[in-house]
Image (cartoon, rainbow, N blue to C red):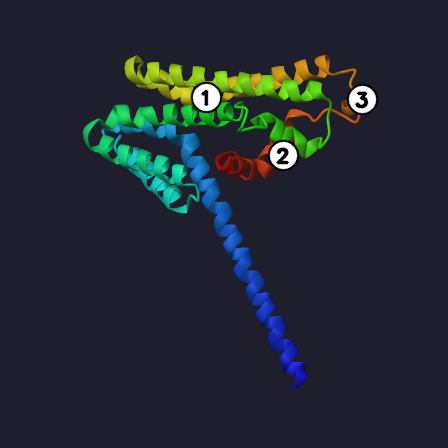
Amino acid sequence: MWVYGVIVIINSMLILIEIESLALLIKIIKKFVITGLFLAYPYLIYKGVESGMVWIAPVIFSVIFLRQSFLAKNSWAKIFKASIAIALILGAYSMQTLTAKILPVLIQLMLMYFFGRTLLRDKGPPFIESFVRIQFPEFPPAIGRYCRQLTIVWTVFFAMNAITVSVLAIWGAEYWWSIYNGILIYLFMGLLVLIEYIYRRIRFADLSILHKGIPDPISTIKTMMANGRKIWMDVQAR
């Protein structure tokens, strides 16, 4: 009889593993779909304006933000995301094109806010430092000051993006709005990462902590992807 008991236990464990694997797969697919929608958003809006169905995108993203609002643990995040969802629904009804084009502005402002608020004395450490500490738990004060300066640079970068996207959304043609949001903004981000990496190697070439090897941009991106959500939630909780 004990043999059958062992078989039942093993079978139950396999079923649980399959369920957990399936749940993990669904979670990964969901993340890819949402990320894909955000990346394709400029193209969807451009095609939506051409076809007269620009209202679809704001409605889709209002559902995404509403779901995130329900899942958010922070009260401020719940209110903020629910407000975006309501604004998108109302805008999809009355100001379809402008509402659809203004969402990237909100995203840039949100990034500016999260990077910038970590610069406040009681909200630290700076956003960049949180990632650096994962790769280098201990580092000289010079690195800490540099992390703060780099966080300022990214905060200004997102602020400038918000201004540019706002101008294009209000006065620019749909074509240039989609090109900037769908292509140029990512090229500028990549260029900033590359320039910072080269500058970092030159500025800190004599520090012993970096003699082990300065993380290349790809390693840094992998670290951000692996720990981004944890640090993001930590910033929200500060």
Sequence-wise, the earlier of marks 2 and 3 is 3
Kindly identify which residue carries mark 2. 223
Circle 1 sits in a helix, a strand or a loop, which is it? helix
Would residue 127 appear left or right of 162 to someone viewing this image? right
Q: Residue 222 location in percent, x, y?
A: 62, 34
Q: Residues under labels 1 and 3: Cα distance?
A: 38 Å
Q: Quadrant of residue 68?
A: top left
Q: Is there any visible trace of residue 96 in the rendered image?
A: yes
Q: Residue 92 location in percent, x, y?
A: 24, 32
Circle 2 sits in a helix, a strand or a loop, which is it? helix
Q: Residues within 10 Å of mark 2 (few under 14, many from 20)?
A: some
Task: Farthest residue to the bottom: give it.
Answer: 1
Q: Residue 62 location in percent, x, y?
A: 32, 38
Kindly identify which residue carries mark 1. 183
Q: Quadrant of residue 172?
A: top left
Kindly identify which residue carries mark 3. 208
Amino acid type indicated by mark 3 = Ser
**x 34%, y 17%: residue:** 166
Q: Locate the N terminus by quadrant.
A: bottom right
Q: Nearer the viewer, mark 2 or mark 3?
A: 3
**Residue 18 or 119: which is nearer the viewer?**
119
Q: Residue 163 location in percent, x, y?
A: 39, 15
Q: Is residue 21 above or below residue 82?
A: below
**Residue 235 or 157: which is nearer the viewer?**
235
Task: Farthest residue to the left: give it.
Answer: 94
Amino acid type indicated by mark 2 = Thr
Q: Nearer the viewer, mark 1 or mark 3?
A: 3
Sequence-wise, the earlier of marks 1 and 2 is 1
